[in-house]
Amino acid sequence: PVLAVRFLPLLDYPVWIYQSHVLSNVQAFSDHFYISWLPVPNLGSTLPMLVLTPLLGAELAAKVLVLVNAFFFVIGYAYYVKGVSPAQAGIVYLGAAIVYNIFFIDGYLSFYLGLTLILFVFGFILRLPGPITWKNVIFLSLLSVGAYLFHLVIWFPIFIYIVITGVLKRQTIRWLISQIIPLILFLIYALTRIGQEDIVIRFHQDLRNKIFALVSPLLPF
């Protein structure tokens, strides 16, 4: 589906391509744009696109990113399912059936990429035997930072799951330490935004959309 057409009919997808083109040629657009150096929790597609766009151009770079993500989404889904139950041999192949999901259609590129990461994170946590080691704490911290940069609604379920797991395993401090860096990044972002503008809390007019947004990271599971 990705290679069949030049312009993918995805809602937010053209915005991400445009953003990558501007960032890769920011000097040419200096009269209209400037870069704000903040740990924005929506950079999951922006950062790899910054590497790929100068080599391939923004359009092809986005396609390559989506193709690579689709491949790893299927693998990540199987990895997660086997972590839940090694006996579920048939279910591991369902990843190929849901890889082009509603978030792909909506063109939420960072969120779509983040779904793949969250599969690997939960799969990794399920495989941690016994007490968590400091090596695993560091690795889990790196994964959590990546999840935060993809999207807040990708990181929040990981954060909640880690807190609950830490309490149940009576290793709350070690598990929470893995979340210090993403928490710091979030505070930097939030405090900077608060300093720049008034706080406005916006809710979806349609309550069903709001609930859907909250549970969306769990849908692949």
Image (cartoon, rainbow, N blue to C red):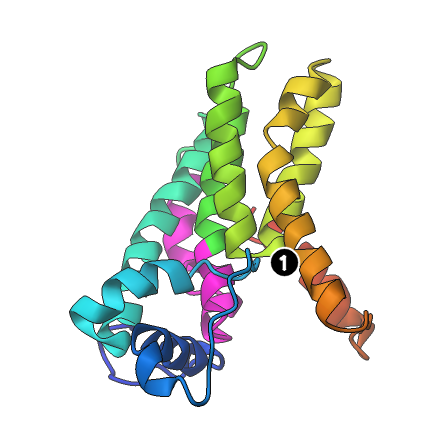
Residue that badge 1 annotates: 216
Neighbor class of circle 1 (other Cα within 10 Å; few <14, some 14-19, many 20+) is some
Q: Residue furthest bottom?
A: 31
Horizontal side of 87 relative to 49 (left or right) equals right
Q: Taking the image as drawn, is residue 17 in sight?
A: yes
**Rendered image quadrant of residue 131:** top right
Q: Amino acid at mark 1?
A: Ser
Question: Is residue 61 on the magenta stretch?
Answer: no
Residue occupying image coordinates x 71% and y 30%: 163
Image coords of residue 29 (percent x, y):
37, 86
**Rendered image quadrant of residue 171:** top right
* Image label count: 1
Dominant secondary structure of the magenta stretch? helix
Horizontal side of 98 relative to 132 (left or right) equals left
Residue occupying image coordinates x 52% and y 13%: 133
Image coords of residue 141 (percent x, y):
53, 32
Question: Is residue 112 on the magenta stretch?
Answer: yes
**Rendered image quadrant of residue 192:** bottom right
When the figure is inspected, residue 199 is found, relative to residue 157, above or below; the finding is: below
- Mark 1 element type: helix
Image coords of residue 173 (percent x, y):
70, 19
Q: Residue furthest left?
A: 55
Q: Nearer the viewer, residue 21 or 114?
A: 21
Residue occupying image coordinates x 72% and y 20%: 172
Q: Quadrant of the N terminus?
A: bottom left
Q: Which residues are magenta?
A: 90-113
